[in-house]
Amino acid sequence: MSNAARQLELGQASPRCEVCGVPVSIKPTGRPRQYCSNRCRQKAARSRHIIQILVSIERMKADLGIEIAIDWSDEDHRVA
Ligand SMILES: [Zn+2]
């Protein structure tokens, strides 16, 4: 059983994974963990990356004074 699951059972107040909300174990040494797993850490990194792209698009739009149309529709859901 993972440390996160054990802490959940104990009901300890602990920092939670920023991605999935699972309590993460606190290490006596080193920095507190923000994520329960590498998977969540990578997911968060990807989200941050996307947000950075969105922010730069907004900045570009403001700088250039133009509207950029973004097609958010998923390729898979498009009717062929
Ligand atoms: Zn997580």
Image (cartoon, rainbow, N blue to C red):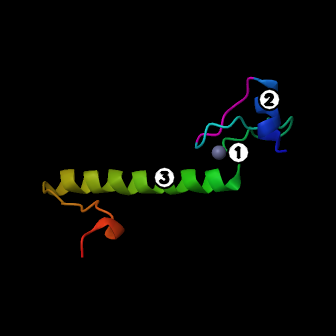
Q: Amino acid type of disc 2?
A: Glu
Q: Marks 2 and 3, Cα distance to the nearest angstrom?
A: 29 Å
Left or right: residue 28 versus residue 66 is right
Q: Decide: few, some or many residues near mark 3? Use Cα within 10 Å; few <14, some 14-19, many ≥20.
A: few
Q: Position of residue 15 (x, y in %)?
A: 69, 31
- Which residue reaches farthest left? 66
Left or right: residue 6 versus residue 80 is right
Residue 25 can be seen in this image: no
x 41%, y 51%: residue:
51
What are the residue bounds of the magenta stretch?
Answer: 13-18
Query: To which residue does mark 1 refer?
Result: 36
Judging depth in this view, the residue of 18 and 61 nearest the camera is 18
Q: Decide: few, some or many residues near mark 2? Use Cα within 10 Å; few <14, some 14-19, many ≥20.
A: few
Magenta stretch prevailing secondary structure? loop
The correct choice, above or below, for 69 with respect to 76 in the image is above
**Mark 1 CB lies closer than 8 A to ligand 1:** yes
Q: Secondary structure at mark 2?
A: helix
- Which residue reaches farthest front? 79
Query: To which residue does mark 2 refer?
Result: 9
Q: Amino acid type of disc 1?
A: Cys
x 71%, y 50%: residue:
37
Residue 59 can be seen in this image: yes
Residue 47: assigned label? 3
